Amino acid sequence: MPSQKRHFITLVYLTLSITFIQIPGSEIFAVYDHLPLKSLEYSDSKIIKVREEIKYNLQISVSNLEQKNLVPLRFLVYKVGPKDTFFKIMARTGMDLDTLSSVNQLASPQDIYPGMELLIPNMRGVYDSEESSSEESVRKRVAARFRISPKFLYYDDLRKSWFVPGRGLPKEEKNFFYGLVFSDPLAEEGRVSSKFGRRKDPFTKKDTFHGGIDLAASEGTPVYASADGEVSFSGTRGGYGSLIVLKHGLGYETKYGHLSKLLVNPGTKVKKGQLIGEVGMTGRATGFHLHFEVLRNSMRQRPVFKGHV
């Protein structure tokens, strides 16, 4: 019985780890292999091979050599260790910041954690954030925008996005990644009383995940928009109490909870640093503070701004 179970898991793994991408009217366009990477040592055979393929693919894609073909796109899967950092993984695998963050949808270098599985492609490049259709006309449009031959583009049917080899992130997305977009919503008038990540719930005393940061401050302390955006919600929501949600570019949102006053309405466009509310302790709170969250594509991210990482 144990051996049957192992074979079943292996079969499922192989089935899920290979995705065939079909473009209408053409042959199979790409094969996405997900192969485990156990070590970051330079002597590891998989590291040697992926670095060689990255170098070759980069030369072809950057120079736009249409007469040559890229080594087909494939991914290694690396489980982050306790001593790993974003920049160590980037250097050892031959990646760059743009590729590693785009492929893994990271909002900042601090997003990785032990046990997290990172995808390491065998070529540098980024996912296009504007187009989601796999139509041939869209492929040509994306290629024209990135100034690259259409034959080099890969369509990812899981992410519904085009992978563009040899190209980097737009300046706006880099600014988000480096924490240059968001500012302190209390303009340095608060102190961090609870960090992002695992913590003891103040009510149940159980170990729970805290999806934002708490900034303790006096009642009525002004709360400012952390970045330019549009108010998507302003009202009461469960444990958040009085809550404001702002939508920003590239799938980012910020949440401002436990407010005593809501000073903006849904649909209002706001500028970074604009007054939107006041600190309170509405909802599930033990004292006066602002609960601040940053989300990207509905996934909570570690808030990164000057003075807080």
Image (tube, rainbow, N blue to C red):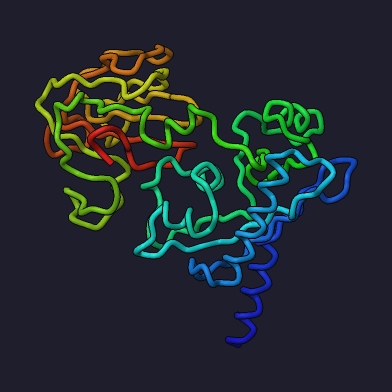
Looking at the image, how many numbered discs can be counted on the residues?
0
Q: Nearer the viewer, residue 209 or 91?
A: 91
Residue at 42% across / 52% down in the picture?
Answer: 87
Residue 92 screen position, x and y as percent: 49, 60
* Residue 283, percent from left and from top: 22, 33
Viewer-nearest residue: 95 or 172: 95
The quadrant of the picture occupied by the N terminus is bottom right
Q: Is residue 267 above or below residue 56?
A: above
Q: Which residue is located at x 81 percent, y 40 percent?
A: 66
Tell me which residue sits at (52%, 41%) in the image: 98
Is 279 on the left-hand or right-hand side of 152? left
Q: Position of residue 164 (x, y in %)?
A: 67, 39
Query: Looking at the picture, how far across and down is residue 114, in whole percent?
Result: 38, 61
Residue shown at 27% from the left, 13% from the top: 263
Within the image, what quadrant is residue 188 found in? top left
Q: Quadrant of residue 205?
A: bottom left
Quadrant in which residue 241 is drawn? top left
Q: Is residue 96 left or right of residue 65?
A: left
Q: Is residue 302 left or right of residue 169?
A: left
